[in-house]
Amino acid sequence: MTKDVLLSISGLQFAAREEEEVEPVEVITAGDYYKKNGKHYVMYDEVMEGFEGNTKNIIKLTENSLDITKKGVSNVHMIFEKNRKNVSYYNTPFGNLLIGIDAKSVDIAETEDNIDVKIKYNLEVNYEHLADCFITMNIKSKEAGDFTLS
């Protein structure tokens, strides 16, 4: 894997109430990659529309966990570990939320120029179930050329 990567993150939230719409979210951006002590790290900046400044994101991948840290316009440290619930405060420009992430599966597949991540988790806000969620992430060396979404 090269230092310069393309990162695709797509996610779905299946609402707790059936009358609510499922809204997919997708981001494709350039980032910086490195591997240290057997862990993969990806860093990228995120711009939040309507707000000055940006949010610096650090993604840390281990064999069976995903760790996301956001610092800037919004701040949070989210940990996705299979069969373990992690709780954190999500500081946004609109206020603070207590979120719970209960990962049901964390699947990470790695090749020389590509890392695929698939995570299923339950999302809680203030100890109440909000949604069943699914994240797909693809990290690919820029030189790999054929960038496709999983």
Image: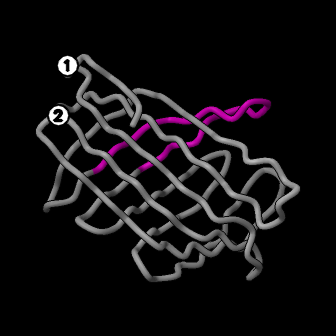
Q: Position of residue 128 (x, y in %)?
A: 77, 79
Q: Label 1 crowding class (10 Å Cα cut-off): few <14, some 14-19, many 20+? A: few
The residue shown at (51%, 43%) is 56
Of callouts 2 and 1, which one flags the residue occurring earlier in the amino acid sequence? 2
Name the residue type under label 2. Answer: Asp
**Residue 64 image-quadrant placement:** bottom left
The residue pinned by badge 1 equals 143
User: In the image, is residue 84 above or below residue 95?
Assistant: below
Q: Position of residue 101 (x, y in %)?
A: 57, 72
Magenta segment, prevailing SS (helix, strand or loop): strand
**Range covered by the magenta-colored residues:** 41-58
User: In the image, is residue 150 above or below residue 72?
Assistant: above
Left or right? Give the position of 2 relative to 57.
left
The residue pinned by badge 2 equals 113
The local secondary structure at tag 1 comes to helix
Residues at badges 2 and 1 in contact (C-beta under 8 Å)? yes
